[in-house]
Amino acid sequence: EIGAIIFDLDGVITDTAEYHYLAWKQLAEELGVHFDRAFNERLKGVSRMDSLHMILDHGGIVLSEEEMNELAHKKNEHYKTFIQQITPDDLLPGILPFLNEIRAAEIPTALASASKNARPVIRQLKIESFLDTIVDAATVKNGKPDPEIFLKAADQLAVTPDKCVGVEDAEAGVDSIKAAGMYAVGVGSKKAMAKADWIIEHPSQLTLKALRGHYG
Ligand code: B16
Ligand code: MG
């Protein structure tokens, strides 16, 4: 029986990837580095600093630690402006009914997002009451694909990892779930989600019945 369900945020509950894209694009333009949607795909689930490293590498730019911190801060300021627009309408289709189902079944839930902006986003989506715990990305030493963030979520729920289901849309995220010894639901293409235990194309396919059927 499923002991807990741990959700990724971006790409599973809501699609903030577009806002990350716009914020990075603004920064890349200021730096004179080419940045497009294809490159943005590679930043899914990747931390802010690691994303910046990838963009600078791509543009052949070398900067000091201090300059990089400044740029990461700047990107986040752009991002914070964009996410102010988020409302409950931005929940991906199917997520709210699934959260209601989980609540009714009294299955504990957690959020394991790499985003340090996860809390304000969850608040704006008005789903705080559906999550028993939110792992603060700022307190996690090793980002995805390291299992730390999912293990911490399980620990906070007091459920053993082998009873947990993780839901992710990024390859690094699925790796993180599997490394934690959990059951992985991958949202996305068969190719990108190859290592997931159950692959779905869209969060709207998430129902407790379907999940239990696959989980066994
Ligand atoms: P922040 P997730 C990740 O969230 C995003 O997918 C990734 O693009 C972003 O860089 C990362 O959070 C850090 O976000 O700059 O807000 O701390 O998919 O793990 O929910
Ligand atoms: Mg994600």
Image (cartoon, rainbow, N blue to C red):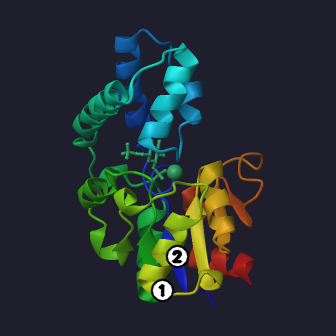
Decide: is 161 above or below 21: below
**Spot occupied by residue 124 in the image (x, y as percentages of width and height):** 24, 55
Residue wearing tag 2 = 5
Would you identify the image quadrant in which residue 49 lies? Answer: top left
Instruction: Count residues near mark 2 (Cα–Cα under 10 Å), then give few for <14, some for 14-19, many for 20+.
Output: many
Amino acid under label 1?
Answer: Ile
- Residue 79 or residue 70, whichever sits in front: 70
- Residue 88 or residue 199, whichever sits in front: 199
Instruction: Classify mark 1: helix, strand or loop.
Output: loop
Q: Which of marks 1 and 2 is nearer the N terminus?
A: 2
Residue at point 25%, 55% (across, down): 120
- Residue 49 or residue 156, whichever sits in front: 49
Instruction: Classify mark 2: helix, strand or loop.
Output: strand
Q: In which quarter of the image is the C terminus?
A: bottom right
**Spot occupied by residue 215 in the image (x, y as percentages of width and height):** 71, 79
Question: Is label 2 within 8 A of ligand 1 (CB to nearest ligand atom)?
Answer: no
Residue wearing tag 1 = 107
| Image disc number at residue 176 | none
Instruction: Count residues near mark 1 (Cα–Cα under 10 Å), then give few for <14, some for 14-19, many for 20+.
Output: some
Residue at point 53%, 37% (across, down): 43
Decide: is 156 above or below 186: below
Is residue 131 visible in this depiction of the protein?
no
Amino acid under label 2?
Answer: Ile
**Spot occupied by residue 46 in the image (x, y as percentages of width and height):** 52, 44
Decide: is 162 above or below 52: below
